[in-house]
Image (spheres, rainbow, N blue to C red):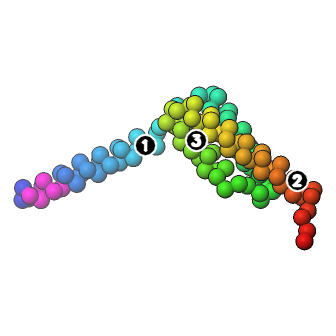
Amino acid sequence: MKPRFTLKLLSSVVLSIWLVNGCAQGTTKSASAASPEATAAIAAADAAIKKAKANNWIWRDTEKFAKQAKEAADKGDNAAAVKLANKAQAQAEDAVKQYEYEMANPRGL
């Protein structure tokens, strides 16, 4: 074999192993850095969002705040995760209250 071909083959093998190893390490990170308070706040927000979605009456940014809370919890920023989860929960609960009010008080023209 030519030295140049051997170098290319060896480079490809090393790169492939490095890529596979990197991908495998990314999927094994299952331990979350979230505190129990953040996890509970996110779960409460998800439950409130589920109820609002059941009515098909959810506010625009509610799910965005819940997603940001999950990302903050994954990064270990528990204070921000709790704050964002509480904001998402409050918006979802307010959306349900708005839905109930609109159904009880129709505004016909």
Q: In this orientation, which residue lies closer to the viewer: 98 or 36?
A: 98
Q: In this orientation, which residue lies closer to the viewer: 48 or 105?
A: 105
Q: In the picture provided, is 29 more to the left or to the right than 37?
A: left
Distance CA(mark 3)–CA(mark 2): 30 Å
Tell which tag, 3 or 2, sits nearer the viewer. 2
- What amino acid type is highlighted by mark number 3? Lys
The residue beneath circle 1 is 26
Q: In the picture provided, is 78 more to the left or to the right than 14?
A: right
Residue located at (19% from left, 52% from top): 11
Crowd band around label 3 with a 10 angstrom C-alpha radius: few (<14), some (14–19), many (20+): many
- What amino acid type is highlighted by mark number 1? Gly
Mark 3 or mark 2: whose residue is earlier in sequence:
3
Q: In the picture provided, is 65 more to the left or to the right than 5?
A: right
- Residue 60 at x, y = what percent? 67, 56
Q: Which of the labelled discs sits on residue 101, or is there none?
A: 2
Residue located at (72% from left, 46% from top): 91
**Main secondary structure type of the part rendered in magenta:** helix
- Residue 53 at x, y = what percent? 75, 55
